[in-house]
Amino acid sequence: MNIQHNISLQPYNTFGIDVTASHYAAVTSIPQLKELLHDNTLPLFILGGGSNMLLTKDIEALVLHIQLKGISILKTTNDHVWVEAQAGENWHEFVVWCLEKDFGGIENLSLIPGNIGTAPIQNIGAYGVELKDVFDHCKAVNINTLEEHTFTLEDCRFGYRDSIFKNSEKGNFIITSVILKLTKNNHELHTKYGAIADELSKKEIKSPTIQQVSQAVISIRKSKLPDPKELGNSGSFFKNPVIPITQFKQLQIRYPSIPSYSISDELTKVPAGWLIEQCGFKGKRFGDAGIHQHQALVLVNYGKASGEEIWEVAKKIQKEVAKTFGISIQAEVNVY
């Protein structure tokens, strides 16, 4: 096995944090993955696209960098297609691949950073669409038994940025591929969430295609979110909090312009970015760690910030939001 030692993980995380992995192996096949797991006596650290993590210290473990590649069509009907993508495929490149074939359902998830294998763990979502809406099943290897396992939509217990892989099965499986059920025609468009409708209207598009919806999403994301290749970040750092309607109505008295998205008759979602901006953090900088000038939900590394420094800024934000609004905001990013 080609295990490397004392490898910098700076190129492999979108925050660009320079920490060292004591042991590192790039995984390109399932037999190789099983062999590494079978022979390993060290703690494990599973690395995908490195887009949803904040590394605050060196990793004293065997880092398995999942780089399984390949996209294939498993089955088609008149209306639907089932596509399997291996865990190491880049998510946005996969979206583009599907759009080129006019496969619909994930256009709203364009330009989300990261790889396929971590998408079910987070139940990634954006602009009114979540992975669970198109998810059929995923395949995974049990870390302890080395057996291959299939997880159905029901098995995954998806929630808001949540799944079984973050709860009862945390640390037990490595996802190797994901199978999505996409539309071939009669695409169901989701254009009411966020600024998609405005973006389409600006371009005078009244009956958009899935490709045009994707381009609208890309334009919005690029206007708000920095490119990790140019400025280290992990996209949205915090989850949007879900609070009781009764609490929201009390806040509305004090803050009439507070935005929200209805979840049910009892619950509503409040944009964390708005809360953070109201607390005065948007565009603020603390050394090389800071908050992006165009999107308060995004924490950034301006150069040589450590993971600890970025995490301190995050905790400062959490404390101020709780003090101002009585709302606890939780990190969407995994902190190590």
Image (cartoon, grey):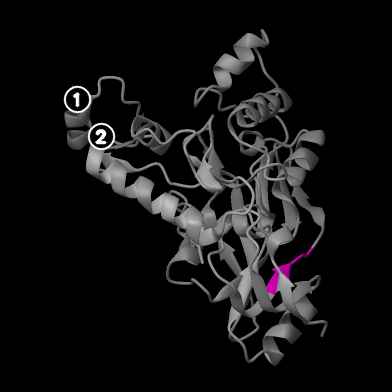
Figure check: 281 above or below 163: above
Q: Please name whichever residue, 39 or 10, is drawn nearer the observer in this view of the structure.
A: 10
- Quadrant where the N terminus is found in the figure: bottom right
Q: Residues within 10 Å of mark 2 (few under 14, many from 20)?
A: few
Give the Cα separation between the discs numbered 2 and 1. 22 Å
Q: Residues within 10 Å of mark 1 (few under 14, many from 20)?
A: few
What amino acid is found at the position of numbered circle 2 in the picture?
Asp
Label disc, if present, on residue 22 of the rendered structure: none
Residue 146, how many percent across, how many down? 65, 83
Figure check: 13 above or below 318: below
At 34% from the left edge and 48% from the top edge, which residue is drawn? 318
Q: Please name whichever residue, 278 or 35, is drawn nearer the observer in this view of the structure.
A: 278
Among all residues in the image, which is located at the extreme top?
A: 204
Q: Nearer the viewer, mark 2 or mark 1?
A: 1
Answer whether labels 2 and 1 touch (C-beta < 8 Å): no
Residue placed under numbered mark 1 in the picture = 254
Q: For the residue labelled by badge 2, is the local secondary structure a helix, a strand or a loop? A: loop
Q: For the residue labelled by badge 1, is the local secondary structure a helix, a strand or a loop? A: helix
Quarter occupied by residue 240: top left
Label disc, if present, on residue 265 of the rendered structure: 2
Residue 192, how many percent across, how many down? 50, 22
At 67% from the left edge and 37% from the top edge, which residue is drawn? 110
Q: Main secondary structure of the magenta part?
A: strand
Looking at the rendering, the stretch of residues picked out in magenta corresponds to 64-68
Q: Is residue 166 visible?
A: yes
Figure check: 142 above or below 123: below
Residue 225, how many percent across, how many down? 60, 35
Residue 322 colored in magenta in the image: no
Relative side of 292 to 22, left or right: left
Relative side of 271 to 237, left or right: left
